[in-house]
Image (cartoon, helix red, strand yellow):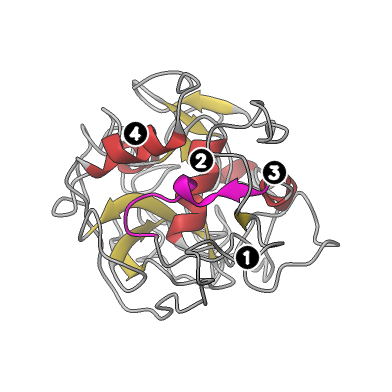
Amino acid sequence: MSGLIAPQSLLALFVLGSMATLGCNGGGSGDGDDEESEEGAFDEGTGLGEGDCADICGTPACGTCPSATMVDGGGFQIDATEVDNGQYALMLEVEFDVEILPPGCEWKSDFEPEEWADDLDPTLPVVGVDWCDAMVFCAWSGKELCGAVTGGASDWDNAEDAEGDTWYRACSSAGAQGYPYGPDYEAAACNGEDSGQDALLAGGSLSTCEGGAPGLFDMSGNVWEWTNSCESATGDGATECRRRGGSRYSDGDNMRCAANSRRVRGERDNALGFRCCG
């Protein structure tokens, strides 16, 4: 997988992705019980419902594309930093057709993050997003939520697949090291509980948290990152999916590239975001 996905139906992208084996593990909450209208469409004003957009940004009715730097992750492209509030806000300006939803996300009613506000710092990573929010944003922006190197979902049963899993391959420098910056834990290198930062940071703020590819930042700490790896290709809001990298609240063990944490697909919390691959 290399470069951006060519413009095409987002629904087609999701169908192709769902044909791959998915995977995830861990606790969590949120089963997606938002109310639908009688016609099967969602409430107006949420960004999801009777809108006209069922394609990628830059096409009619689908809004402005967010600007993002991508780097070579080892045979594919990956966002240099986590998706930020400014980038995500562009998607919230779009009214989507319900066909935008990937398999397993039929319960969704909106894409607005938990505790979202218009005055959030646009440079900080977006948090409070569930797995479906992340999947739709990446596809809408012409990319994919990081999963398999060949595209679609990565192997649920193998969290340390240095050849086939984009996120793990990029973080670990193709399996060569335990942390993005090297083999051993360095407390101050990235934004975790031992770093002394005690706050969410804008992407790339810590030059010491670069790796395992040149120009790639914050693969350890700051916010957990959803990946395209779930226990079922369909399911619902209670289906588990894999998150990676740890957050500003994490210890050294959870900030390893190989850390294998799982949360239910519908979970939104203030330490959980994502980045995209392409």
Residue 248, horizontal then vertical, whole percent = 56, 67
User: Which of the two discs, 4 and 2, sits closer to the camera?
Assistant: 2
Q: Is residue 243 left or right of residue 97?
A: left
Label 3 secondary element:
helix
Numbered badge on residue 113: 1
Label 2 secondary element:
helix
* Residue type, numbered disc 3: Gln
- Mark 3, residue position: 87
Q: Is residue 204 left or right of residue 105?
A: right
Q: Say if 109 sits above or below 245 in the image.
A: below
Q: Residue at x 31, y 48 (%)?
A: 178
Q: Which residues are magenta?
A: 95-105
Q: Say if 193 sits above or below 214 in the image.
A: below
User: Which of the two discs, 4 and 3, sits closer to the camera?
Assistant: 3
* Mark 4 or 3, nearer chain start: 3
Q: Is residue 265 left or right of residue 207?
A: left
* Residue type, numbered disc 2: Cys
- Mark 4, residue position: 173
Q: Residue furthest front?
A: 39
Residue 64 covered by magenta stretch = no
> For the residues marked 4 and 1, what is the alpha-carbon distance in whole angstroms?
31 Å
Instruction: For the N terminus, give its image quadrant.
Output: top left
Residue 137, horizontal then vertical, whole percent = 55, 45
* Residue type, numbered disc 4: Ser
Answer whether labels 4 and 1 touch (C-beta < 8 Å): no
Residue 110, horizontal then vertical, whole percent = 58, 63
- Mark 2, residue position: 138
> For the residues marked 4 and 2, what is the alpha-carbon distance in whole angstroms?
23 Å
Q: Residue at x 48, y 46 (%)?
A: 100
Answer whether labels 2 and 1 touch (C-beta < 8 Å): no
